[in-house]
Amino acid sequence: MYPYNYPAIRCEETMTAFPPQHQPFQPGVESLMKPQPVSENPDYAASGKLRGKVAVITGGDSGIGRAVAIAFAKEGAHIVIVYLASYERGDAMQTKRRVEQIGGRCLLIECDLTDENCCQYVVRQSIRVFGRIDILVNNAGVHYVDKSIEDISAEQLETTFQTNIISYFNLTKEALPYMTSGSAIINTASVTAYEPYDLAIDYAATKGAVVAFTRSLAKSLVSRGIRVNAVAPGMTWTPLIPASIPADDVVFFGRNRPMGRAAQPWEIAPSYVFLASESDSSYITGQTIIVS
């Protein structure tokens, strides 16, 4: 069974299982997943909380990033989606089409955020097209499973930290000159920052760093009226899962949680809307919402 040390307290028949599957690349591709993650709540009632805002979302092509892009668009925002590689373009295009169907504009940018020059390019392109950046969602991430710290290579360690936390530093630094009072930065942490597990030590370490980064940056920017918060999702059915854990373990993903299942991306997205909306969270900064 997938090795998270939490007891299963739901009956077997109430638990959601996924078929065995694995993708031999990081990040994974949503269109290859079975079943497809659910990115959108059809009953979501928007109220224009982000009307006219421009949001840059890294890893916005799929998973939680896609769900956030759709929810933001429903609230009236225009979206910049940053994704890593050409094989993700199909996912990115699908997200773009949905954003535009809702009525938002959407810019796709393919680049590797571990390269500081790419972070500069993302900001330049966002300003060129939209003229502003109101919301920055640092969400891109990778996740590897290893039996021991001795199995974590220097290359993997560097990739995990470069993607999961250093890119957050670099993109934030580039975007800040264009952000004004009322702007918001939202970082994707993880419940593993608080409940770490022994098979993804490097990943858990980066997510703990995201929480500390969020609190420190919030104090640094509070005088400028820019709020900085984080969301720490629990087990969520995203492309990172089949891209990181063994195929046979996918079957058990989320089944040992109290609700007996993993979350769907749409269930995580409203927390990002809440933190992005100045009318909802104007007195919240430096905090992490755990959705688990």
Image: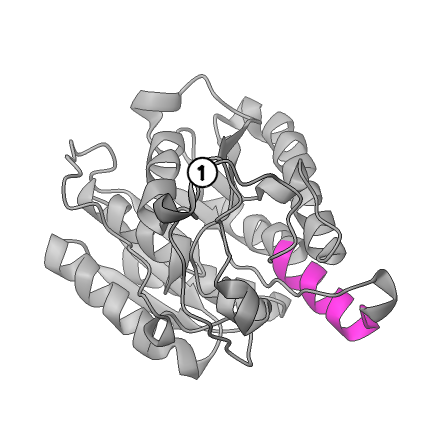
Q: Is residue 127 visible?
A: no
- Say left or right for 278 vs 46: right
- Say left or right for 256 vs 34: right
Q: From the viewer's side, name the closer residue of 180 and 23.
A: 23
Q: Identify residue for label 1.
A: 10
Q: From the viewer's side, name the closer residue of 206 and 4.
A: 4
- Say left or right for 291 vs 116: left
Picture quadrant of residue 142: bottom right
Horizontal and vertical percent position of residue 82:
42, 64
Q: From the viewer's side, name the closer residue of 94 and 168.
A: 94
Magenta range is 152-164
Q: Residue at x 28, y 42 (%)?
A: 53
Picture quadrant of residue 239: bottom left
Look at the numbered disc 1 and give the secondary structure of its residue: loop
Q: Is residue 159 magenta?
A: yes
Residue type at the position of mark 1? Arg
- The vertical placement of 289 against 38, above or below, is above
Horizontal and vertical percent position of residue 119:
54, 63
Q: Residue furthest top?
A: 283
- The vertical placement of 105 against 51, above or below, is below
Q: Residue at x 50, y 69 (%)?
A: 242
Horizontal and vertical percent position of residue 78:
25, 51
